[in-house]
Amino acid sequence: MKKNSKLFRKIVIGIALFIIVPILLIGEISIYKLKSALESSLKTTSIQTIKEVDKGFSEYLQVLGTQMDVAAKNIYIKDLTNSGADHKLTVNYVQGMFKDTKTSVDGIINAGFAGENGELVLDSGVLTLNDLNFKEREWYVKAKAANGKIVYIKPYKDAVSGKQVMTVAQAVKDDNGQFIGVIVIDMSLDAMQKYIGGIQLLNTGYVLLADGDGDIIVNNDKNTVAEDNVTGLSFWNSAKGEDLGVYTFESNKKSFYVCQETDEKTGWKLIGIIDGKEVEDGVMAIHGTMLIISIVLVIIGVSIGVIAALYLMKEINRLKSVINKASKGDLTGRITVKAKDEFKELGDDFNTMLDSLSDLLDNVQNTSANLIEASANIASMSEETTSSVSEVTNAIQEVSTGATSQAQFATEIAANAEELSDRIDEVDKHTSNINNLSNVTKDLSKQGIFIIQDLIDKAASAKTNAIKSAGMVAEMIESINKINYISNVIEEITEQTNLLALNASIEAARAGEAGKGFAVVAEEIRKLAEESKKSTDEIKTIVTEIGVNGNNTKAAMEASREMSQAQGQVIKETEDIFAKIVESIIPLTDAIKEIKDLNEKMHINKEKVKSQIENIAAVSEESASISEEVTASAEEVSATMDELTQYASNLEDIAGNLKEKMSKFTLK
């Protein structure tokens, strides 16, 4: 029952999880997509609302700008710079015009014209620079520099009324394009505060107006995230450089959505702030509904699981009852299933299996009885066969022993013959080597005789050349002696010339101016004589060295001639020795040839003997091998019969055990 209850729990839990997990996944995915859709809708709606607010704000400024353009083009404004008789009338007219403007546009506190001539005409009166130095005011300076464009000055708190006031100014030029003054209007932000404060974004959102520096111009009573400026909020770093955008930020652990758009005229930013709870409330509402649906589906799923589990357990218990009987040997039980489903098919298949198993076991019982009888007969026959095989094995063993001995003797003879064959091969090899060496020696001896003969011829030629060279060296030495004689004569002549030149120089010096030219010539002759003497000395030195080398060469050639004679004698003796070597090698070569022929004949006979011995050994080995194979086969047959006897005995025991166990089954 415990096991059944465990299975029941598993089925119920499995079905429940199968239903719960998809529902939870679908719920989470749906909530995520819903949140994304709500955020997208919130951003789109907020942007559209802010655009509409900016459109209304721009239209309000456009009305004001139109009034200023009309005033700037008014001829009476331009006539204010003239100080004629009609100046007062012009001032009155302009004041009336500003009063009409003040009435037509809601929120205007003051309107006037500040002239470059130092006169400030307001709807309520006229001031001069002594009353108010307006030329240094921000609105005047910026309007003058803006070249006709309207400028918007950052709002300030009016000291008299205590209201937030915004100044708007525009430069005025005369017909010649010369700057003549500035139209200036002070506006209360009450109307703008009312307009912007009345705008609601969704359920909790509101709108602020801030300048380009983040300072709040128009605040909202719902604002709890910033007091005077928005620069401390995390979205500002991104928003200040963009004209349009949607952002998120956190304040006091609460999340907010922000959308902003920058006004083209003023550069100010309309900022919409929506509490993140807007999206969270929508998500939570859907989340609650989905939770209720999920709980209902889970209850339904678990109920279905319980019903299905009860049905499954009922059918499983039926199967279990019959299977329990079969496990104890009772194969008479059958499963009855009324429902036409997979359990019906399973029950029919199980019943068919029991029928087949009963038939099989019945056949096994019959077969086991026959098997006991057959195994007894096999055991008896195997014992008789084993006895016969043993006798055959003994006879073959004796034949095998004789064949083995014969093969062993033949093998030893073959080994000896093989060793003899190797020795003959070695003799033949050495004989061939000696024959080759004798032939090589013979050839080398002949070649040596030829080389020595050539050497004799070259030695004779060298001797002849040495004799000729000695003669030429003797002639060279004689020529050197002649050169030495001539050099001595030249040296004596140069010494005499030098003395003559010296005497001539002395005589020229005595002659004075007349002998100067002769003295120069004598000096040149003396220099030539000295150079000739110097050259002659060098020639004598060179000739002396050549003479010494010539004598050395002559002595060396004489020694070479004597050595050549001795060498000729040695070469002659060497030639005689080579001739004797050739004569002694010829009979040695003939004897070696005869030995080689005998070895070849011995080798042929050796191969024949070796072949016959190998045949005998092969036949003996084959006989021994066959005998061993027959003996081995007989032994294998004997072993097989022993094994067969053992198998027959085992088979008889198995058949007995099988019969005993089959008796436990109830088949019919």
Image (cartoon, rainbow, N blue to C red):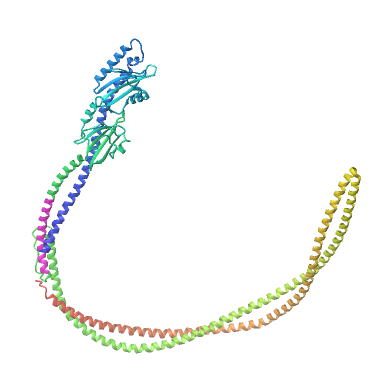
Q: Residue at x 13, y 56 (%)?
A: 12
Viewport quadrant of the C terminus: bottom left
Is residue 306 on the magenta stretch? Answer: yes
50 vs 520: above or below: above
Magenta segment main secondary structure = helix
Q: Residue at x 15, y 74 (%)?
A: 364
Q: Residue at x 85, y 61 (%)?
A: 484
9 vs 589: above or below: above
What are the residue bounds of the magenta stretch? Answer: 298-326
Q: Is residue 382 left or right of residue 429?
A: left
Viewport quadrant of the N terminus: bottom left
264 vs 607: above or below: above
Q: Is residue 34 left or right of residue 608?
A: left
Residue 600 in view of the camera = no
- Relative image position of residue 636 (x, y in whole percent): 30, 82
Q: Quadrant of residue 466?
A: bottom right
Q: Is residue 195 left or right of residue 587?
A: left
Residue in the foreground of this view, choosing between 126 and 256: 126
- Relative image position of residue 137 (x, y in whole percent): 34, 25
